[in-house]
Image (tube, helix red, strand yellow):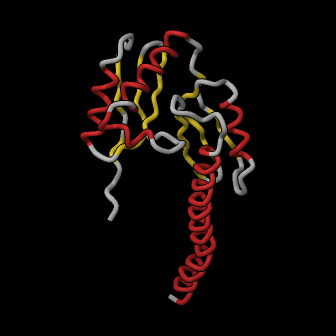
Amino acid sequence: MRFKAATVLASLLLMIPFCAAAQNSAKSDERITREVRHELLMLPYFGVFDNITYKVEDGTVTLMGNVVRPSLKPDAENAVKHIEGVDKVVNQIEVLPPSTADDRIRLRLFRAIYEFPALQKYELGVRKPIRIIVKNGHVWLEGVVDSEADKNLAGIRAKTVPGTFSVTNNLQVAEPRS
């Protein structure tokens, strides 16, 4: 009986460092996540027509999304790989194909959304919360808005732009602040 109790106690004591390591890893990933967000927002050519998402898991940062400028893909990777605690960066960012037709659609979408009176509040500030992604005439709206009405309005405005084949509205509604 004593041997069994001693074995259980020894097993529990051996698990403590693993639990502490898992907790430290989660805290480290949380800190890395905050720093990755900051570094990506500080990229000089990161604009309204780009969308970079990421996930952090055990020191590995995976970059995803779409960018217009080819140089933004390696810039994002370089900005993130120097963060303390980042062991590996997996860069899955897609560079959108150059297209004058898509460029025209992007400008029309920007005007249709950001110059519409009910959505002009999103135009304020340097970083626009509604991201406009255009690939071969297909449109994706990404980002965060204040209400379901704003989300729907942005989608409706995007669908009125000539030259678009489809509009996918992936806008998220922000949690109300308490």
| Front position in the image: 3 or 18 | 18
Residue 118 vertical position relative to residue 18 in the rendered view, above or below: above
Percent x, y of residue 115: 38, 30
Percent x, y of residue 140: 41, 26
In the picture, the quarter occupied by the C terminus is bottom left
- Horizontal side of residue 54 vs 82, given as left or right: left
Residue 161 vertical position relative to residue 19 in the rendered view, above or below: above
Percent x, y of residue 6: 57, 85
Residue under the point 34% across and 37% down: 119
Q: What is the residue that sits farthest to the left in this orientation?
A: 149
| Front position in the image: 103 or 39 | 103
Percent x, y of residue 103: 52, 16
Residue 117 vertical position relative to residue 164 in the rendered view, above or below: below
Q: What is the residue that sits farthest to the bottom in this orientation?
A: 2
Question: What count of labels does the image hold?
Answer: 0
- Horizontal side of residue 144 vs 34, given as left or right: left
Residue under the point 31% across and 57% down: 176
Residue 74 vertical position relative to residue 106 in the rendered view, above or below: below
| Front position in the image: 125 or 8 | 125
Q: Quadrant of residue 26?
A: bottom right
Residue under the point 40% across and 30% down: 141
| Front position in the image: 111 or 84 | 111
Residue under the point 30% across and 18% down: 160
- Horizontal side of residue 78 vs 169, given as left or right: right
Q: Quadrant of residue 27?
A: bottom right
